[in-house]
């Protein structure tokens, strides 16, 4: 045999080359230059070995879990499945040569109501829809909050100068009438509508009566990689166009959330329920240092505004989990039994799947007019800051009281900012009167003569013009 090889040097050289190629392409771990090997693999149409191994492990783990029944109440069990799915999705997104069919199949099995083909953007898709855009605003609008949405659109465009595209989501003809849709689109440029029933036709979701539950589905259905979800009754005090560049917590994690009021009132014990769901899981640092966890306050999150970078695979799969929590059977049987609508599902989904997330430090404050004691503000508006402790937005619309009939515009003369520690918090009165909450602070801030005061007056004039435009709603 040796003599045969000696007489055929070309065969020897070819054999050595084949052995070298084998080790380079199939076991790159033996070679310290991982980057070089990945490039060589791609050149010959072979996926990266590390990502292939990661994907195969995730498929095996998820297939095993999907063969085991879990009840709707087992959010922790569902979180384990989403984590495995996220691992597979990250490997698939990182290595374009991996076969995407196993991922698509498992997504469909885990979320039967989801048809990824109907979504304009999926972060592991090789060919996203041509309509996909970078950053934009998404809001759910129905006939009942049409005027609030019109106020928001006109104040963003005409007062703040925001140029972000806006998508208005609704669930069928009975949710937002064609006449109102046409009116909203005609208010400014770059306004579009999405019928969520076209994207999620599965009746098990029951989106027609979902209310708050529509919101995460609107995020998924939007064409924006980086989406800012807002309620129609939100008012901005600065344009949000650069949010994904200026808020470091959002840059770091791909998520940005805001706290609700720091109130200790007798209500559903959300923290106790969450502790039972988590079982042996240890809370993240973000949860461990929160007043919700330390002092058992009423709510952790106010979901009037939510920012999520869907181009990050882990954030996207977490959003799928959020939507699952707000789907028909799950929200009716479990999640909405323990929390107020969708508001806690965003961060809880991230917490249970070990997805990094970020809250602005300050809890919700209020904006309104001073009472007779010169230290209390009673109203329906919750005020929120940015990371620099500057007033950024508030909810409750520009109405004096959005829950009452009439079109009176709000008197917004003073501000009380929420604290970061419970001991620093201004004091809320737990007994609201028709959704009017009273907050007492040591030094309410007068807005007289400030930039914010001038902006609010301009916005009230814009809102009055909208009200005049729609004396009779379409």
Image: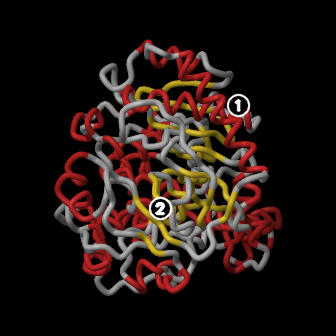
Q: Nearer the viewer, residue 300 or 366?
A: 366
Answer left or right for 398 relative to 335. right
Up the image or down, 401 lies above or below 147; here it is: below
Residue for badge 1: 157
Q: Secondary structure at mark 2?
A: helix
Residue 65: tell me if it is visible: yes
Residue at image location 42% in from the left, 77% down from the top: 292
Q: Is residue 358 visible?
A: no
* Mark 2 vs mark 1, CA separation in Å: 37 Å
Tell whether 95 sits left or right of 37.
Answer: left
Q: Nearer the viewer, mark 2 or mark 1?
A: 1
Q: Which residue lies at the image location 40% right of the left edge and 84% below the top edge?
A: 295
Give the vertical position of 282 relative to 402 (above or below): below
Is the N terminus in the top left, top right, bottom left or bottom right quadrant? bottom right
Residue drawn at the location 44% of the way across and 12% of the way down: 179
Q: Is residue 427 left or right of residue 33?
A: left
Residue in the picture at 37% in, 50% down: 323
Front residue of 58 and 256: 256
Q: Can you name the residue that lies furthest to the front here?
A: 372
Q: Quadrant of residue 118?
A: top left
Residue 415 marker: none
Q: Please tell me in which quadrant of the rendered image residue 461 appears.
A: top right
| The label number, if any, that marks residue 86 in the structure image | 2
Return the residue nearer the eye: 87 or 424.
424
Quadrant of the image for the C terminus?
top left
């Amino acid at each position: 045999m040796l003599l045969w090889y000696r007489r055929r040097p070309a065969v020897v050289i070819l054999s050595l080359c084949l052995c070298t190629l084998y080790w380079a392409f199939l076991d790159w771990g033996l070679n310290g230059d991982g980057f070089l090997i990945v490039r060589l693999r791609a050149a010959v149409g072979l996926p990266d070995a590390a990502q292939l191994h990661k994907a195969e492990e995730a498929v095996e783990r998820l297939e095993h879990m999907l063969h085991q029944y879990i009840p709707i109440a087992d959010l922790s069990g569902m979180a384990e499945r989403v984590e495995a799915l996220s691992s597979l999705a990250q490997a698939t997104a990182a290595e374009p040569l991996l076969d995407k069919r196993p991922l698509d199949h498992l997504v469909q099995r885990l979320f039967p109501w989801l048809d990824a083909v109907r979504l304009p953007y999926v972060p592991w898709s090789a060919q996203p829809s041509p309509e996909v855009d970078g950053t934009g605003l998404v809001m759910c609008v129905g006939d009942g909050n049409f005027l609030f949405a019109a106020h928001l659109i006109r104040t963003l465009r005409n007062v703040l100068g925001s140029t972000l595209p806006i998508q208005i989501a609704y669930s069928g003809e009975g949710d937002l009438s064609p006449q109102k849709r046409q009116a909203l689109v005609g208010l400014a440029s770059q306004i579009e509508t999405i019928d969520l029933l076209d994207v999620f036709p599965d009746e098990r979701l029951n989106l027609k009566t979902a209310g708050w539950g529509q919101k995460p589905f609107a995020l998924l259905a939007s064409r924006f990689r980086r989406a800012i979800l807002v309620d129609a009754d939100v008012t901005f005090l600065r344009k949000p166009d650069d949010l994904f560049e200026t808020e470091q917590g959002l840059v770091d994690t791909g998520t940005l959330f805001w706290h609700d009021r720091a109130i200790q009132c007798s209500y559903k014990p959300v923290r106790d329920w969450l502790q039972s769901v988590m079982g042996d899981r240890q809370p993240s640092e973000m949860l461990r240092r929160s007043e919700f966890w330390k002092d058992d306050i009423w709510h952790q999150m106010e979901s009037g505004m939510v920012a999520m970078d869907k181009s990050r695979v882990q954030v996207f799969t977490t959003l799928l989990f959020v939507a699952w929590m707000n789907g028909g059977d799950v929200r009716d049987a479990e999640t909405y039994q323990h929390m107020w609508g969708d508001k806690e599902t965003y961060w809880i989904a991230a917490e249970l799947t070990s997805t990094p997330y970020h809250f602005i430090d300050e809890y919700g404050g209020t904006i309104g007019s001073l009472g007779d004691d010169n230290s209390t503000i009673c109203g329906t508006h919750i005020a929120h800051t940015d990371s620099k402790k500057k007033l950024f937005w508030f909810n409750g619309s520009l109405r004096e009281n959005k829950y009452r009939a009439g079109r009176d515009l709000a008197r917004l003369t003073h501000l009380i900012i929420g604290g970061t520690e419970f001991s620093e918090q201004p004091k809320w009165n737990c007994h609201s009167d028709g959704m009017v909450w009273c907050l007492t602070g040591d030094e309410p801030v007068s807005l007289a003569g400030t930039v914010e005061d001038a902006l609010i007056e301009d916005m009230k004039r814009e809102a009055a013009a909208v009200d005049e435009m729609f004396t009779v709603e379409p």
